[in-house]
Image: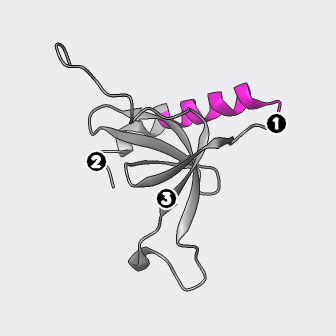
Amino acid sequence: VYGKNGGSQHLKIFGCLAYLYVHKEERTKIDLYKTLYIMVGYDSTFKTYLFYNFTKQKILITKDVKFNELEMAFAKYSSLPILLIKIISFFLRHNNDAKEPI
């Protein structure tokens, strides 16, 4: 926003792990109350974050998250560029599905 001093507290490390809370109504007894996602970007429209879940292969938009910026999702793999390209292309294909944040 022009003329305003923006804060940096919302900036997070791209590719870091994040844990999203799963509401009681949305999980079964054996489901975990937190789900592991990877931070893949920002949504400036809603001032939220974009996350990717490899298990479900879906992008999620939310701001209710606990970041682990000390642990990167692909730190052990040499195929990081290929995986990031897949994530970004997946998001671009499915961007129209994400109308509003959770």
Magenta region: which residues?
Answer: 77-91
Q: Along the horizontal axis of the image, is 17 left or right of 96? A: right
Q: Amino acid at mark 1?
A: Tyr
Residue displayed at 47% across by 31% down: 92
State whether residue 84 is above or below residue 102: above
Q: Along the horizontal axis of the image, is 70 left or right of 99? A: right
Give the labeled residue for mark 3: 20
Q: Nearer the viewer, residue 55 or 32?
A: 32
Residue 84 is one of the magenta-drawn residues: yes
Q: Amino acid at mark 2?
A: Glu
Residue displayed at 79% across by 30% down: 79
Give the labeled residue for mark 2: 100
Q: Nearer the viewer, mark 2 or mark 1?
A: 1
Residue displayed at 74% across by 30% down: 80
Q: Along the horizontal axis of the image, is 66 left or right of 46? A: right
Image quadrant where residue 6 sits: top left
Are the two marked residues, 3 and 2, in contact with CB atoms closer than 8 angstroms?
A: no
Give the labeled residue for mark 1: 77
Q: How much space separates mark 3 and mark 2, taking CA atoms?
A: 17 Å
Q: Amino acid at mark 3?
A: Leu
Disc 3 secondary structure class: strand
Prevailing secondary structure of the magenta residues: helix
